[in-house]
Amino acid sequence: MKPFKRFRFLLLHIGFLIFLSTGLNNSLFAGETVEVLGGAEDVNLRLVALLNKLDPDFYADEKTQGFVYRYRHRWKNPYDFNIYVGKVGKTSPDSIIRIESPRRGQERMWKQILEQEILQKSPHESAVPLSEKYHIVSQGLNLITPMASVGYNSWNSPLFTNRDTFVSMSIYLLCDLILAGGAYLYAQENLPKKNIWDNMANVKGPGSVWESPNAVGIFAALAVSRAVRAFDAWEDTSAHNKTAQFGWSFKF
């Protein structure tokens, strides 16, 4: 499964370029921070307990980037995160938690979870609980087009912002256009050509691209984006449903 995550990470970077081309200038990896009363050791214990409750497939990274603690997801974990715990300042008794994720929506989602769980803050007045999503719907839509699957998973889900949805949809549309479009042109260029004798004998032409032996390449190209999205859709649905089962409310 690791190659899927690496490929998706590459696609997210392509999506970042797409996003920049829209004229919006916010960073895709802006990060979110939560300030917590108490020392880093105590805050760390509370954070680890929360991470274990959501999904135990994470690990402590020794490269803390100047923080005291750092935690990252494993490939089986449906969430994507880098979470740091550190001190607000050298002389301050309080701590800070920083959340980074390839998706801005996940960063904001984690911040709201931490505020409700660790800070014991009430959710925003406009926040709402989550409803369950279904793997069969997400995967079924993916067979039609990955964009539809992204739309389903992003609807009323804290895992996505509008920008995340736009970038993800653009990535899959671009992949289909490049891969399937290239395969179509290749098949078209390699259709048998009628010679002068065929024309004189009124021989039937080679037929359409879809009748060509190379037509299988078009379907193979379409399968690439759907294979990547299949894993992505599993993560999105699993992460959404794991979050929904705890009854937290989220502001979208």
Image (cartoon, rainbow, N blue to C red):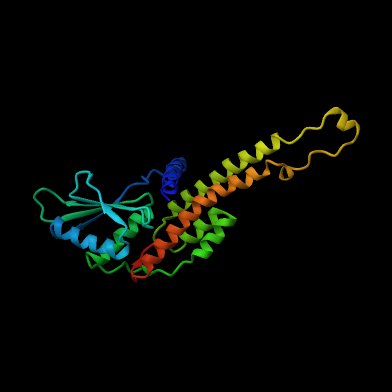
Q: Toward the viewer: 74 or 113?
A: 74
Which residue lies most toward the top here? Answer: 196
In the figure, is residue 189 to the left or right of 33? right
The image shows residue 52 at horizontal and vertical percentages of: 28, 63
Residue 223 vs 110, above or below: the answer is: above
In the figure, is residue 155 to the left or right of 89? right
- Residue 93's image quarter? bottom left
Which residue lies most toward the right here? Answer: 201
Point out the image quarter for the C terminus: bottom left
The image shows residue 100 at horizontal and vertical percentages of: 31, 50
The image shows residue 134 at horizontal and vertical percentages of: 49, 66
Q: Residue at x 34, y 46 (%)?
A: 29
Q: Residue at x 55, y 56 (%)?
A: 142
Q: Toward the viewer: 116 or 216?
A: 216
- Residue 51's image quarter? bottom left
Q: Toward the viewer: 196 or 13?
A: 196
Number of numbered callouts drawn? 0
- Residue 78's image quarter? bottom left
The image shows residue 181 at horizontal and vertical percentages of: 62, 41
Q: Residue at x 32, y 66 (%)?
A: 124
In the figure, is residue 216 to the left or right of 230? right
Which residue lies most toward the left here? Answer: 91
Q: Toward the viewer: 219 or 145?
A: 219
Q: Residue at x 17, y 49 (%)?
A: 68
